[in-house]
Amino acid sequence: MNEVKTITPEELEKLLETEDTLNLIDVREDEEVAEGMILGAVHIPMGEIPEHLDKLDINQEYIIICRSGGRSGRTCDYLNELGYKVTNMVGGMLKWTGHTEPKL
């Protein structure tokens, strides 16, 4: 198992300015994402990740986001063990100061 990479909200915000095709997965619950998500993020609650593995490409890299970084860290550990390339956004949405969009 590889060590899970991390990214800060500030680093992700800068990366979003230059990259068009980042794979962002928000693992918060429905009521949390109702307050807003990072533009382009896909919502898959943490508990539903195992049943959505068929939607993830093992050859792609994913940045996992939650409220504070704990659930996204556990999700990263799980996906990393399965061979996925994942990065945990430490600090989560509590530390995010960038633009958010309502969940569609």
Image: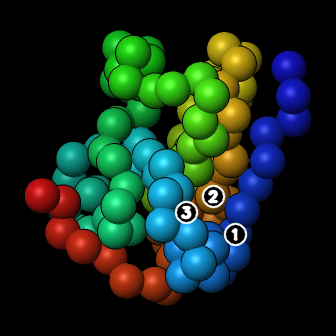
Q: Which three-letter amino acid code belongs to the residue tagged 3? A: Gly
Q: Position of residue 40 (x, y in %)?
A: 35, 61
Q: Residues within 10 Å of mark 1 (few under 14, many from 20)?
A: some
Q: Which quadrant of the figure contains the N terminus?
A: top right
Rounded to the nearest whole Å, what is the CA distance between mark 1 and mark 2?
6 Å
Q: Position of residue 82 (x, y in %)?
A: 66, 14
Where is residue 62, by image quadrant? top right
Q: In this picture, is 71 found above or below 11?
A: above
| Drawn side of residue 30 relative to residue 96, left or right | left
Q: Residues within 10 Å of mark 2 (few under 14, many from 20)?
A: many
Discs 3/2, front? 2
Q: Residues within 10 Å of mark 3 (few under 14, many from 20)?
A: many
Q: In this picture, is 97 found above or below 68?
A: below
Residue placed most toward the observer, 101 or 17 = 17
> Tag 1's secondary structure?
loop
Discs 3/1, front? 1
| Drawn side of residue 95 relative to residue 66, left or right | right
Residue displayed at 49% across by 49% down: 23
The residue that mark 1 highlights is 8
> Tag 3's secondary structure?
helix
Q: Which three-letter amino acid code belongs to the residue tagged 2? A: Met
Q: In this picture, is 21 found above or below 16?
A: above
The residue that mark 2 highlights is 89
Are dots 3 and 2 in contact, CB under 8 Å? yes
The residue that mark 3 highlights is 92
